[in-house]
Each structure stands twice: as C-alpha cells, then as structure tokens.
Amino acid sequence: MPGPALTWELADGVAIVTFDLKDSPVNKFSRAVKDEFLATFTALEQDRAVRAIAVFSGKPDNFIAGADIEEFVTIGSAAEAERLAAEGQEMMDRVTRFPKPVAVGIHGACLGGGLEFALACHYRVATDHPKTQLGLPEVQLGILPGASGCQRLPRLIGARAALDIILAGRSERAPKAFRLGMVDELVHPAILQDITIAAARRLADGWRPRRRRPGGVLAWLLDRNPLGRRLVFRAARRQVLERTKGHYPAPLAALEAVEHGLKHGMAEGLKREARLFGQLAVTDVSRKLVQIFFATTQLKKDFGIPNAPPPTAVQRLAIVGAGFMGSGIAGTAIVQAGVDVRMKDADLPRVATGLAAARAPLDDRLRRHRIAKYEYARLAALLSGGDGYAGFGRADLVIEAVFEDLSVKQQVLREVEAAARDDAVFASNTSTIPIARIAEAARRPERVIGMHFFSPVDRMPLLEVIPAARTAPGVVSTAVGFGRRLGKTVIVVKDTPGFWVNRILAPYANEVGHLLAEGASIEEIDAAAVGFGFPVGPVTLLDEVGLDVAEKVSQVMGAAFGERLQATAGVAALVKAGRLGRKSGRGFYRYGGGKKRGVDPAVYELLGVHPNGGPRLAEILQRLVDGMLNEAARAVGDSVVGTPRDGDIGAIFGFGFPPFRGGPLRHADDLGAARLVAELERLAERYGPRFAPCEVLQEQARRGSKFYP
Amino acid sequence: MPGGNGRRVAVVAGCRTPFCRAGTVLKDVRAVDLARLAARELVHRTNLDGAEVDQVIWGQVVPSALVPNVGREVSLLPQFPKEIPAYSLNRACASANQAVTAAHDQIVLGHADVILAGGVESLSDIPILASRRLADILVEASKAKTAVQRVKAFAKIRPRDLIPVSPAIAEPSTGETMGQSAEKMAKENRISREAQDRWALRSHQLAAQGSADGRLTAEIVPVFPSRPGDPIVTEDNGIRRDTSLEQMAKLKPVFDRRYGSVTAANSSPLTDGAAAVLLMNGEAARALGYEPLAYVRSYAIGAVDPGWQLLQAPVFTVPRALERAGVAWKDLGLIEIHEAFAAQVLSNLKGFEERGWEINEDIINVMGGSIAIGHPFGATGGRLVTTLANEMKRRDVQFGLISVCAQGGMASAIVLERR
C-alpha cells in the first residue's frame, strides 16, 4: 500500500527507497511518515530479494528538513513530548539494527531529524553541492536533537565537534561535514545515486568501511578519554553560559544529554535525551522561539500589502553615497544577491573608499576560504563606481544613502530621475525623514519608497520597507523582494517619524538621560538591560549607533511627538564634545583596538551628573522596558506595523529584543495589559507624563484583550 | 562605398584606461583586469544592457600565458550573459584597429548587431620565458617515471639555463628592432633630429592641451586601487607638460649612438593600458536609442617587406582605404596617425606628400599622439577610433582618417564618416 511519502523499487538486489513527501516543498518527519518508514522497513526486511537498501530524497534540493514543526507545536505535555522523542529514537534504532545494510545518499538540506536518520544509517554519501548542508538546528527552537542525535553524533565525530554543532544549532556545508567525518563520501550530484547504491551492494557483500577518527593526538587527548572529556564539557558549559547568559535552557540540556550518554552508555543517554527533550518542548522559551520561526517563515511570503503584485527582479542596483551605509548595502548586494552594483559619490577618493569597504565582506570570505578566487573575481567584478551617474540608466533599483538631510536627498532624487529609467525604483535609506517629504521632489512619486537598512548592513538581519502614500504597490513588492534576496527579514512599515524600530527605541534611549541625571551609573543601566536579555544595554547601543546619528534621530522624534519622546540634553552634550561613540573611539565608553575599554568617567563630568546610587536595578529595568512596550503599543494603535507579528520580528531582528520573550508585544501580552497599565501609571506619577499608558493598553486592560488573541 | 549589405557600422562610444608607462602606476594591474575595466566602464557609460552584445573581439600583442584569450575573459564579465562568443587577435600595433574592422565585417555580414571591440597591453605583465634547455629539462622531468630518472633530468641543469628570456621587440624575420628600423627610416627619408624632436614636442603640447581642456580625459576611466589608500589612477602619465626642445636635444640617440637621431624623447614609450569601442549596426543603434558618433566608411590593411622600411606601409595602405571610401585626401577633416616614432610619422607624411597630397598639420593628431600619450600595442587603435570619432563630432567633421603602422611591416587605415 503506497503511503504519502515513500516509494521503492528493486534494482539488482538493492531496494532504492525514495522519500518524497506529497504536497510539501520539503521532506519532514511526522508521525505518519514515521509509521510509513517502519512499515516500509518491515516489508524490506521480509522481502528476500532485497539484500541492501539505499535511501534518497525525491525533492530537487532538499534531503530531509527535519521534524514537522506544525505537529510539534500541538504537543500538550512534557510526557507526550518525551514519548515522541522515544518513538523517534526507536525508529532510528530500528534502522541501525536493520539486518540488511542501509546506505543513504544526501543532497540538499539534511537537518534535525533528517541528520539523525542519516546518522542511524550504515553508510552516508553526500553531494559536494553548496545546497547540501548537514546540521542539528534544534536548540534554535529551544529543544534538543531528541531522536538519538545527542548520542550518535558525538560517537561518530567526537565530543568536541559534535558539541560545536549541537550547542549552536549549526549546519555545516558538505565538505566540512566530510572533513568532520559526518559523511563517508563526498561526490558530484550526478553520481550520488550510483555511488550510494554501489556502496549498499558492497556492504551486502560483506564489505565493512573503515572509518578513521579525525583529529589526531588532540582528539585522543580530549575526545577519547574521560578526563579530557571532562575538560571539554566544562569549557563548553562555560561558553554556553557566556552566550546565553542563562536565558536559554536548551543548549545546557543538550550538553547534559551528550555528557550523560558518553558517561553511562547509549541506552542511558537515550533515556536522558528523551526526558530532557520532553521538558524543553513545553518551556515558554521553546514556544517563543517556535513562534518566531513561524513568523519569519510567514514573512518570507508576505509582501506587506494586500494583493501585492509580483516583484520586479532587480538585476542591477545603483547606489548614491559610498559611505558606511552605501558601501554596506553594495557589499551585501553582491555577496547575497549577485547583482550588478554601481556606486556614485561626489568625488573619486570617496568612491574608492566605498568600493574597498563594499568589497570587504568578499575579501573576508576569500581569506576564510568560503569562496574560491574565481568566485571572488566574478563577484568583485559586479562592483563598480564613479563620480557621475554613468550606469544609472541600467539600474532597476536606485538606493540613496547620502547625508541625512531633506534637501540633499531631494536633490539626489532629482538627479537620479534625470539619469535613471522611468520604471526604475528610487529607494531612500533614511532613518528619520518621511518618505512622502522626499517624494515631493519627484517627477514620479509612485516610484519612490523607503528602505531603511540597519548598520552594519552585512550583519543586521532586518530591513524596514516604507511605502509613502503615493508609492505604487509593485514598487513595494520589488523593494520587499529585493530585501529578501539580500538575506534580510523584511517588514513593511508606515511612513511615520522613526518608522517602527527607531520609534520604539526612542523612549528606551531617552530614558538613559533621565536615569543618569538621577544618579544611575552607565554600567548599571547597561547591566539591567543585558540582564533582561538584550544583547547590549541602551548606553552601549547609543555608542554603537553613533551619538551624532542618535542625536539627529531624537531631534526628529522630539519634534514629531513632542514632550513624550523629547530627549534629554545628554547625548547632544557628548556630540558637542566630539564624542560620537565607537566610531570616534569615545562615547559613553572608551574604545581602543576595536574593543570597548570601559566607561569614561569624564562623561559624568561632562553631563554634570554623579553616579551616586540612583534608582534600584529593578526600577531602572522597568523604566527602560515599560517605556518601550508602551510606545510599541501606541505605534501598533497608529498602524505603524501591519500586525503585531511584524512589530515583534522588527524589534527582535532590528535591535535584539530578547527572542525568548517573543518581542515587545508578546511580552506585553505575557505581562498582561492590566499590570502594564498599573506599572506605567505608577511610573508616570513618579517620573512624569512620558510614561502615561497609551490608549491601546488602557483599552486592552479594560476589555482584557491582547495583541495576540 | 558606404557600408555593405545595406548595413552601416556605427561607432557608438569608446573609452579607455589611463595609458601609463610600463612599470609605473599600473604595474600591479593584470592586462585582463585592465581590459575588463575598460569594457565594463563602457557598458556603464553607455547604459548598455549587456544582453544586447553579440560578440566581443579584443586585440593583444603579448598575451599572458595564463590568459591566452583575453577577449573571452572580457565577455565573461558578470555584466554580460555568459553566451557571448569572444576571441582575441594579434595584428601587432594595429590589433585594436583589427578588432574594430573585424567587428565591422561581422556587422556588415549580418552576423551581429552589437559588438564590443577593443584592445589591451600590459608590458608590466609580459610572460618571462624559461630558457629552451630548462624547458626541455622540465618536460623531461615531468615525464620521468621513477625518482632516479627525475633526479637525472634535474642534474642536467646548468646555472646559465636559469637565466630567463624576455620577448624582444625585434622582427623575427630580420632581427632588426623597432628602434633600429626607425633609425634606418630617419636616414633614408632624411628626417632630421630636430624635426623629430619638434614633432615629439608638438605631441606632448597638444596632448597636454587636450588633457587640460578635458577632451582627452573625458575618454579615460579611473583605475581604482585594489588596496585601499593606494592612489587612484585617472590620467596618462607619459605626457610632459614642461618639456622643451632644449631638454630633448640633450638626449643621446639610443640605436645609433654616433650618427643616430632616434631618442627616448621622440619615440613612444612602453605602455600599459586598455581601450574599448562599442560598434553597432546603425539601425540597431537607433533602435536602442543611441546617437552614433560616426560610421565606418571604409578600411584597408597592407604590408611591405619588413627588411625595407618597416613602418612605411601606411603610405600604400591609406590610399587604398581612401579609394574604397571614395573620399579624397583633401576631403579629410581630421587625421589620427599612430606615432610609434617621430621618424616614422614624418616618413609617413613625406610618403603622402610624394603622392601629391598636401599636408595640413592643423588637422593631424590634434590632441597629440602615441609619443606623448603612450602606446599599449594592442589598445592604441581603440584610443584612435574613440578620439577621432569624438573630435569629429565636436568639430562636426564629415570625414576622418586613422593610419597605424605595425610590426611586421604592416599597416591599417580606417576612414570614418560623421553622417
């Protein structure tokens, strides 16, 4: 009886099993698929003509993406999750103990349960294709590899290499996986089937592949004796805590599962692995991470406007302004999207600097052997520049990243319109200026849009796309589609001052000035935020963004929203003193040799404040966070984002709002509007009306409603 | 004889890298990169969609051993689809002329509508050869089956085998170098040292003027450094703005120290550079929205016995091109003569004069020539076509001529027309 996923045929004693899950772009393990695997294996065991098995995927560029997460989220209890893991382990065990040899041919993503299955097979062949990646990303969803991955991987490639993959939820490209010993052979995609089937046949004839453990003396010292392993685990635990600051239980649990298994044997390890999986599966952290996963997956298909027309595929990009942002966009565009990029700035030395900066991520990849020198030459040749608008007539999309000044941007827009095609899109990378204002200078305002990148462009995952009132829907699709090709998570936001990210950051950043004035220390403020789960505190964030930029943004926000988002004079005073943050080597902190060197005490003097206790840590935190949640709620009320989902993703990817809290709006839901309103009222009474709870929260408090019903 | 097959070939645009003396500011840039830079910049300057290009034809006289077909590397720029066929050719110093005329033929035949033609030379990037004996030994060693055989092969190497051989600019058929030929022509055609120096001075002065007023520099694309902080190369570095006849007179003749007259100052220098020209079927140009600078009216190539006057072939080739064009010498409004040596230019002019043609220096090399600007062998023709076409447009001249002498006793002549 044919099931939904598996088919097989016999070829000269070898059963060629093809996994091709119906109505799904990728292969996933669900209960139904698992049952079908077990049934198929039973049939293959009984069929005497079958001497060996070779398993492949029927998907073009995907092997097995992992477990079905839709099914996973329906799990109600830890016990149920533990049972699910144990069933998975049983299936893998069935494969390993199968009386006939099982070889697997891997092409495309082989992740999570997919890799655990491959590890259970007797022989693994992988293609040397860039799409072929092997990994165990479970901890990214707050769980651990529960179908024996925590046991099999360290036994195959050693504890150190396995922990590197499991604890970070990493995927390795096929050549690296081969070097680590995760697969036995690396072949060209065209011969994957032949080689895998031949291996299965040889195994059936009694051949036993010899696996040499990689790593030499060091591996023997660290991986293959209990004392060395203890060192490895201690170091790994320390690293995990450094990275997660204790907010994420999954990596520690995975570590425990691996360690327990190596100490007490496979059977005990599996038991512990399943139990820990069960516990993790129902944690709030895991739920939040899965929600984020679903949200980003949805966002990949959502163009942010109703009935979005298909995007124009941007092949040629032109950029005005070869500064930090312009070159960052250029570099990302060539590396991620492989588009032709033309840069323009006022003079050749600026262009030269911009071209070199844009090439930097490419140079870096070459140095780290991530790309061959031929690939480097091809990508580098995509990039060119000049001091005029030559080449702009070829561009499908022009992005301006010039000085943040309305008249300068309007002038650039006029010049670009004269040089570019009529159907080219003009995008402004502004963080503060309303797109509609810029578009006032346009002959074709329907082709004008905002694309707000974050700095540094190659590393920051978020892009805000801002249609102005007259922007054509196709232009929105094109901007969103191109942002995605740059590898960005894109949210479409309303053309209001600060858009989404800077809007909700404003009260958070402003609060720094108030807190310092009241005697809080810089370290305390940052520590409070980091303790909450932010990657850095607000003071460090200001230094990173650049105090001049922050000052500009806060002026705009103050002008637009009045007293509520009015900044204190602190940042302006530092800018006046030539302290621009990290880029100038001095801000609130001192910097040297690319590192933060501690708070500069001179700052307190400059601001005329004294760190003398000030508010308690909990109070500092409440002021920082509640102010942000309040503004986020208000912005949702103003329809700055289309859905709470976009708002939360924007905050997480835009400035690192703690993912395990699910975003500011999820967090507000978790606190409950009633409690939040009460806290805000208290803060407003004590510190001023800027904390007055917004209408949206009050309404929610009255009706007991939420952002996510 | 305008065009053929009812098709006319338009010169749409051209550009070039700065021409720089070999071993100076462009010495770290490979020839292939210079060629690709000129080509890519021309694509940007003309806002051309790379998919419109049907063929790429590129001239190079001394190819790198690692990039034997530089044209294909140009057509594999990511601005183009990968399906554009390309070849490289060598007609010595007239190689880029040859690329242009070959493109002309393909367009006239109807095999192509849009062709990117050009040329490149990097004399900082020439192959240095191993000695014949060393090469034989290395081949023998690579074929050796045992270690002993290999050691035996290597044991034959003598110190003198390790001296590398660099290709000389000498005629393989006569052993005479270019400079010796120029020296011979100066004597046989009675071209004085002073006349030569005067022509060289004129070349520098006009090139300096053309650079200062922007006509020459408009054709030049900047070469950005690969290392940040290194200088951006934006101009030709052979042009001397401050030289004088007195200074030139001080130089000793190079090829005949006693009775010679050819010096470093009245010869073109070894040069690095690349040039690119965009040619189209006239109708295609209009359809794509381009206004051509000029059209190719006719061309001719010719050769003389290299043992006679090596660089005098233009005297026989230009009349042929003019005859094919149906244009008289006196109808020419602008003339570009390649300046390998002042002695050669003046010999060529003398030859023209002997045909009864009146020489009007005011229309010859109006922005200087190769003596000042430099002469990257494979690229010079691209510069001449671009410069002539642009100046024809500026002056609204109907007919223009390009005359280039080449190694091997060859010459190329091209007649352009404005409308």
Image (cartoon, helix red, strand yellow):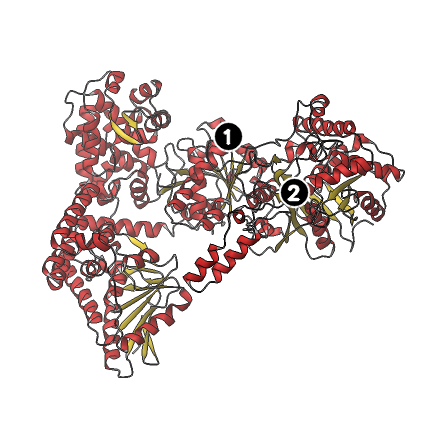
Residue B57 at x, y = what percent?
65, 51
- Could you say which is closer to the camera, residue A394 or residue A216? A216
- Could you say which is closer to the camera, residue B60 or residue B311? B311
In the rendered image, residues at marks 1 and 2 fall on the same chain: no
Residue A298 at x, y = what percent?
34, 52
Residue type marked 2 = Ala
Is residue A261 left or right of B209 when viewed as pictured?
A: left
Please name the residue that numbered disc 1 is placed on. A349
Q: Residue lying farthest right?
A: B356
Whether residue A228 is visible: yes
Of circles 1 and 2, the one toward us is: 2
Is residue A659 left or right of B165 when viewed as pictured?
A: left
Whether residue A680 is visible: no
Distance CA(mark 1)–CA(mark 2)? 27 Å
Quadrant for the N terminus of chain A, please: bottom left
- Could you say which is closer to the camera, residue A504 or residue A660? A660
Residue B309 at x, y = what percent?
79, 43
Residue B16 at x, y = what percent?
63, 39
Image quadrant assignment for residue A245: top left
At a point 47% along the width and 31% down the height, the residue shown is B229
Labels 1 & 2 near each other (Cβ < 8 A): no
Q: Secondary structure at mark 2?
A: loop
Q: Residues within 10 Å of mark 1 (few under 14, many from 20)?
A: some
User: Tag on residue B379?
Assistant: 2
- Could you say which is closer to the camera, residue A57 or residue B193? B193
Q: Secondary structure at mark 1?
A: helix
Residue type marked 1 = Pro
